[in-house]
Image (spheres, grey):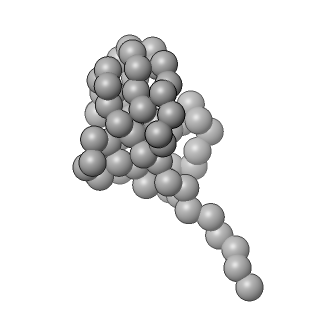
Amino acid sequence: MNVLLNGESRVLEGGMSLGALIDSLGLERGWVVAERNSEVPDRAAWNDILLQDGDQIELVRFMGGGS
């Protein structure tokens, strides 16, 4: 299936959940905010949200630091 991930086209295997996508990218779930088709789903539901062909996914990772 094809999705748009942070503005770039990606081909993913069918039946992948939002949580599985985040894990496959090596992202720490506690530091990520996800948006799917302009909605921000509850983090607890990520494993239950199956991605669909044409979904638009935006992932933002928080980073620590500063002075």
How many tags in the picture? 0
**Above/below status of 7 relative to 10:** below
Q: Quadrant of residue 47?
A: top left
Find residue 18 and report its horizontal and vertical position in percent.
39, 35
Using the image as rendered, state which of residue 22 and residue 36 is in the foreground. 36
Q: Is residue 12 visible?
A: yes
Query: Looking at the picture, how far across and down is residue 35, in whole percent?
Result: 35, 48
User: Residue 36, located in which quarter of the rendered image?
Assistant: top left
Q: In this image, 33 relative to 37: left or right?
A: right
Q: Position of residue 10 (x, y in %)?
A: 50, 25
Residue at the far right: name it: 67
| Up/down of 53 relative to 38, above or below | above
Indicate the quadrant containing the C terminus: top left, top right, bottom left or bottom right.
bottom right
Q: Residue at x 57, y 49 (%)?
A: 28
Which residue is located at x 45 percent, y 15 percent? 13
Q: Residue at x 55, y 55 (%)?
A: 61
Image position of 5 with respect to 41: above or below: above
- Relative placement, left or right, of 64 versus 15 is right
7 or 25, which is in the foreground?
7
Whether residue 45 is visible to the viewer of this picture, yes or no, is no
Instruction: Locate residue 49: give its quadrant.
Output: top left
The quadrant of the picture occupied by the N terminus is: top left
Seen at 25% across and 49% down, the residue is 39
Give the residue at the far bottom of this rendering: 67
